[in-house]
Amino acid sequence: MITSTSLRTCCWLRARLQVMQQSVAGHAMDLLANEIRTSLPPITLRVTNVIGYVILIAVNIAASTGLLGPTNAEISARHPTPLTPAGWAFSIWGIIFALQGLGTVYQAMPQGYTPDGWKQRIVNSVGYGWQIGWFFEVAWQIAFTIDAPASPWICMFLLIGAFLGFAITLLSLFRLKDTCGSLSSVLLYFAFFLPTTLNTAWLSVAAGVGILIVPESYNWDERHVEAFAVVLICLVTALGAIVMQMERDTAYGLTLVWALVAVYGAQSSRAVRITALVCIAVNTLLSTFSLLRRKHPGGGGRGGPSPGTGDAGEPLRQQSASFKRKTDSDQGV
């Protein structure tokens, strides 16, 4: 006859077995997801990244030297908006292109692709995101030089497409960081994270300029366009605040400060200047706060310590060791 003690023992063993099965299944899924991220990036991706970058630089050189027609500065002078930054601010493209060049060359090199390494995780997370963003940027450069009635609309959608392309890529990198921990390599940060952040933040302002060119081309009342510009400045700042709060991305906020200082210096509209000044202060405070939180983690948010200070250089192996300890514990070893 089965005693109550035997029944309790069987129930306990069954419950423990279910817990072990759930634990094994959960860890197996985590390891499978990380296995996909850490697989060697396909050669097609690495080669097309190089080709896409070369095309990007070639088109930008052609546009800046007038080979495609009027330069960007000449066309921008024909379509002023209350959100157009001062000319010096556009030098940030040199930094963005240089960092993207570093990432493009480094991802093409075989060095650094090691088992459980960060390099393949990041390159796989970026995927074709940079190429999508570059496609929209190149298409915008060409469309911007064409003086046609539909050009403002085309340019607006292309700038929004470029922003979304890089924003989605940045989100993918954020997910990688949140899953595997902080970067252990400053080189990987400067080659992939930083250029993606700078490009996304700058394009959020550039897309706003592209949006405002449309009503300007239809000769809207200046006060209405200025009010629209104020709304866009606030939206860009709100988006930056979310990024800095959730991911402690100081570089994103500093890029917005750079852009809005240039807007403040270039515009004469009182409403736009006051809004830009307030948003400069907000972004500066949030950038400082996010930097302090990165140096002293634990105050909320999902971001980790600054690159180079983390201990997550081999998260897969750490997860495997944790899984083994958990399994041994469940088995009573």
Image: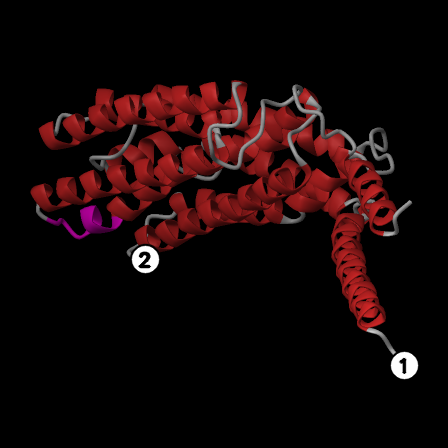
Mark 2, residues whose alpha carbon is within 10 Å: few (<14), some, or many (≥20)? few
The N terminus - image quarter:
bottom right
Residue 103's disc number: none
User: Earlier along the polypeptide chain: callout 1 or callout 2?
Assistant: 1
Residue 290, quarter of picture:
top left
Q: Position of residue 155 (x, y in %)?
A: 38, 49
Task: Identify which amino acid the numbered label 1 is placed on.
Answer: Met
Tell which of 97 and 54 is nearer to you.
Answer: 97
Pointer 1: residues within 10 angstroms few (<14), some, or many (20+)? Answer: few
What's the residue at 34%, 52% (across, down)?
A: 151
Tell me what residue is drawn at x 79 percent, y 36 percent. 318
The residue under label 1 is 1
Q: Distance between the residues labelled 1 and 2?
A: 87 Å
Q: Is mark 1 on a helix, strand or loop?
A: loop
Instruction: Count the numbered circles shown.
Output: 2
The location of residue 299, given as percent across then percent down, is: 47, 28
Q: Are marks 1 and 2 in contact (CB under 8 Å)?
A: no
Question: For this rendering, which residue is in front, 300 or 233?
Answer: 300
Question: Relative to the observer, which residue lies in front, 294 or 269?
Answer: 294
As drawn, is 321 to the left or to the right of 49?
Answer: right
The amino acid on which the numbered mark 2 sits, given as a three-letter code, is Ala
Q: Give the range drawn in magenta.
A: 214-220
Q: Is residue 216 part of the magenta span, yes or no?
A: yes
Residue visible at 65% across and 49% down in the picture: 128
Q: Tell whether 278 sits left or right of 11.
A: left
Q: Is residue 316 left or right of residue 84?
A: right
Which mark is nearer the camera, 1 or 2?
1
Residue 282, by quadrant, is top left
> For mark 2, what is the residue?
150
Q: Where is residue 330 in the image (x, y as percent from the top left)?
A: 83, 51
